[in-house]
Amino acid sequence: MELLTLADAIQRHVRDGQSIALEGFTHLIPHAAGHEIIRQGRRNLHLIRMTPDLVYDQMIGMGCANRLTFSWGGNPGVGSLHRLRDAIATDWPAPLAIVEHSHAEMAVAYQAGASGLPCGLMRRYADTDLARLPAAPLRSIQCPFTGASLAAVRAINPDVTILHAQQVDAAGNVLIRGILGAAKEAAMAAERLLVTVEEQVERFDADMNAVVLPAATVTAVSIVPGGAYPSYAQGYYPRDNRFYIDWDDISRDRQTFTAWMEKHVMSLRDHEEHLRVLGVAA
Amino acid sequence: MSTVDYTSDEIMTVTAARQLRNGAVCFVGIGLPSAACNLARMTHAPDLVLIYESGTVGTRPTVLPLSIGDSELAETAAAVIPLPEIFTHYLQRGRVDVGFLGAAQIDRYGNLNSTVIGDYAHPTVRLPGAGGAPEIATHAREVLVIIKQSPRTFVPQLDFRTSCGYLEGNGARRAALCPGRGPRAVITDFGVLRPHPETDELQLTALYPGVTVEAARKATGWPLQVAAELEALAPPEPADLVSLRDLHARTRAAHASPVRISLPVATRR
């Protein structure tokens, strides 16, 4: 584990053309890291995330990606991700190939990747059109013990997984509290793991079964208070549901979106400035 | 009593809530399903066990979450577990009694589309996609569907089958060894449809006050079958409407409150 500024961590560890997974299910979405990747102009990324959320809507709209693996691509409780839709429907700002899963499939694919397996297994009884898509990484196999028909899902092993978490301790271990999504599985499946955290502490005040990513599993940690905003960090700040609702109007139109990104991300130095410009930092 | 005003969203939510028995383990989606489940929990079914796919089990939110993973869900949960376990240990293992689904399209056998309108490669409308729906539709002991009824949503042929209802009908789902029984009821803004016991075809079994069979037929993209005995559904009880409106008012207030993040004085590198 190395302690780096976020800019240095992205500079050193995220390359054009890589597969990267920014995970965190609604909670602990690493928005600051997504913005830094946009600022540094990465291209042709294969983005992997169960719920692309605003962070991938922004990265796709700013031209960082040529491929997306996902399982639910909406703005939760609000509606569409307009930049994602525009990229799929009209190739703006660049063509985007998609690999589409269900949540359960994608969770199993991460678990397989994290376990060193080439694929994960699911019980599958009834056919859906998802399984018939040309790019579907899904095959039917037979259980050698019972003869049952099972679905095999190809493992996901991102080049880089990026998470946001609450704390790093003096030894470089990372603590995650609250809703986990598939963060731990995505972390253990990756070649490299970058983590942004709310703060550094001497030692954790946590139960022995708390989710800790030991320093040996972590490539680099960056201290970025508010780094999940407008997503949230349990114990630090709530999800800005107002902003998620507002994003619908900001992102609907290409010009409005581009101008917003220019003003709130591209022209700013870092996430702290971003929070100050938005009036969120107290 | 007969003069109580209510919206179609309100009667759909109240009707859906009435389908839930106390103590059931219920897999909840965002929107009307979440409102219906929490209304049921706050009224006739206090021991309803709500599971949200983000990883919260036995959650008892006081406001409705905007997203499936709001902190309210974690803070009021009996357990917060990794998301993969929701789909493996709970859903696939058969621990979910009721799954609640919405969709953009439904066909006469209760199969659902939440992926795309038009051609998959060149969609007219790209929808969010599957999420938890295909496995909920497969594994939950039974499924409730909430969907507004119109020729655009009740279609003769789905543009994409995201989740299974009764497949091609006439026992096809049972023959496919699907562990869950399939959609028990489809709750619309006209009334309730249920599958025919032999053909599996959805038929209109209940209507809201003031709604006609003819209007329901016009809102259906196939020749709608009507049950021999059509139930007349009661309007929402005033007490239910009060609970539901309070819940929505609390939710709106919670979602409107501004977020402030205290940054440490010197975080500069």
Image (cartoon, rainbow, N blue to C red):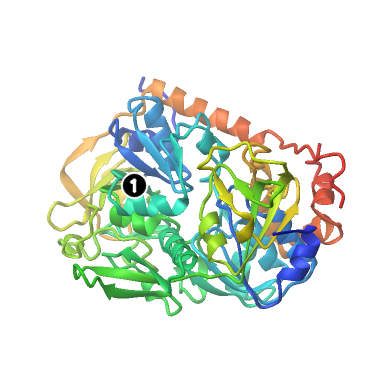
Quadrant of the rendered image containing residue A263: bottom right
Residue at (48, 48) in percent of width and height: B54
Q: Is residue B86 left or right of residue A186?
A: left
Say which chain tag 1 marks: B
Q: Looking at the picture, which amino acid does disc 1 mark?
A: Gly
Disc tally is 1
Q: Is residue A55 above or below residue B98?
A: below
Q: Is residue B245 above or below residue A109?
A: above
Residue at (60, 75) in percent of width and height: A96
Secondary structure beneath dot 1 equals: strand
Image coords of residue A241 (percent x, y) = 63, 42
Q: Is residue A258 visible?
A: no
Q: Kindly identify which residue carries mark 1.
A: B99
Task: Looking at the picture, tell me which residue is in the foreground, A67 or B187.
Answer: A67
Residue at (25, 48) in percent of width and height: B141
Task: Looking at the picture, tell me which residue is in the foreground, A204 or B54.
Answer: A204
Residue reaching furthest front? Answer: A171
Q: Is residue A29 above or below residue B117?
A: above
Q: Is residue B108 left or right of residue B240?
A: left
Image coords of residue A167 (percent x, y) = 67, 45
Image coords of residue B39 (percent x, y) = 41, 30
> Which image quadrant: the N terminus of chain B?
top left
